[in-house]
Each structure stands twice: as structure tokens, then as C-alpha cells.
Amino acid sequence: MNADFDADDFSRTLAREAPDAIIYADALGRIRFWNQGAERIFGFRENEAVGQTLDIIIPEHLRKRHWEGFMRTMNTGKTRYGSGDVLEVPALRKDGTRATVEFSMLPFRDKDGTMLGIGVVLRDVTKRFEEMKRLGERLGQLGVGLSRGSSWHEYD
């Protein structure tokens, strides 16, 4: 092992500078960590996002559903999404435009198992989503069906 390698410094740099968004929200849904990838994807600077609720990136029509699931997870410590599951959902940018993001989440617990919050890693897949949507529409015009994933039905 390289004597100059500092795992803590590496972890901090990776979390802060990763091109994907890394966000941590506490048990009340308030943003406590917002990295450079989140700034790039969503348009909010760190000082604008930290302290706000996740509502700044959740489309209004999905907020009720989001908060019900979020609070259920905080209260029970359980989520219906397994470790490593990747979810695709619409999100909001600061300028009001929509993005499509894929994300995985990691529950954070204290030593007694009480939920402290949720960390997520998000990737902007808007371009791919739009391409797939156009492809589906074109195939539909040609009379060819395209099986679309549940995220297309759940969030459009």
C-alpha cells in the first residue's frame, strides 16, 4: 500500500468532486450534504441547497408520494428498494426544467439502528430517457410495441 495514500482524504475528495450527484438528507428530509455533481445536475449551489428540504428537486405532483415513503423509511428503517437497486425518476432543476435521474440510496443509522437519514447517488439520464421516449413514439407510429419500464408509467 502506498504510504502517501490517505483513505479519508480520498473519500472526502470523491464525495465532494464526483461527477454524479451525492446528496445526504437527514431524518426530516433536510439536505445536509450536496456535492459538485449535484450543483451541475440541479443548478443549486451548495449554500443554496444545504438546509432546504428535498422538495427543491422533487416535482410537485410527486412530493406527497415521496414524503410518505421517506417518512415510512425513517420510522421503520425499511425501504421497499433493496441495496443496490437503481430507480429512475423525474427531478427538478433550479431553472424549473425537468431532468430524469437514476439513483441508488443508502440508509444511515446510528449505532442503535435508529435512522439518521438517507444518502443518494444520482446520475442525470435525461438525454437517454428522451432518446428512448422518441424511439418508443417512432416505433408506435410504425405499429411496433415497445415494452417500457415501470418508471415511464409511474412518473410521467
Image (cartoon, rainbow, N blue to C red):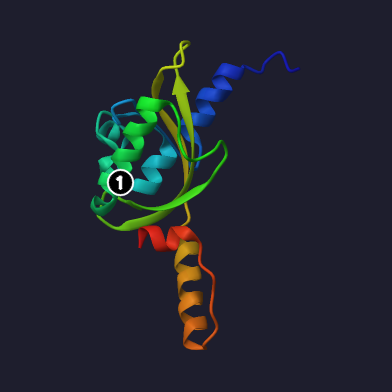
Name the residue furthest top: 111
Look at the image and tell me in which quarter the C terminus lies. Answer: bottom left
Name the residue furthest right: 1
Name the residue furthest front: 76
118 or 113, which lies in front? 113
Residue type for callout 1: Arg
Residue 41 in the figure: left or right of residue 67: right
Look at the image and tell me in which quarter the N terminus lies. Answer: top right
* Residue 125 on image: x %, y %: 48, 56
User: Which class describes the residues within 10 Å of circle 1: few (<14), some (14-19), or many (20+)?
Assistant: few
* Residue 92 on image: x %, y %: 30, 51
* Residue 132 on image: x %, y %: 50, 69
**Which residue is identified by label 1?**
65
Q: Quadrant of residue 79?
A: top left
Q: Is residue 142 above or below residue 104?
A: below
Q: Is residue 3 above or below residue 82?
A: above
Residue 93 in the figure: left or right of residue 114: left
Q: Is residue 71 above or below residue 2?
A: below
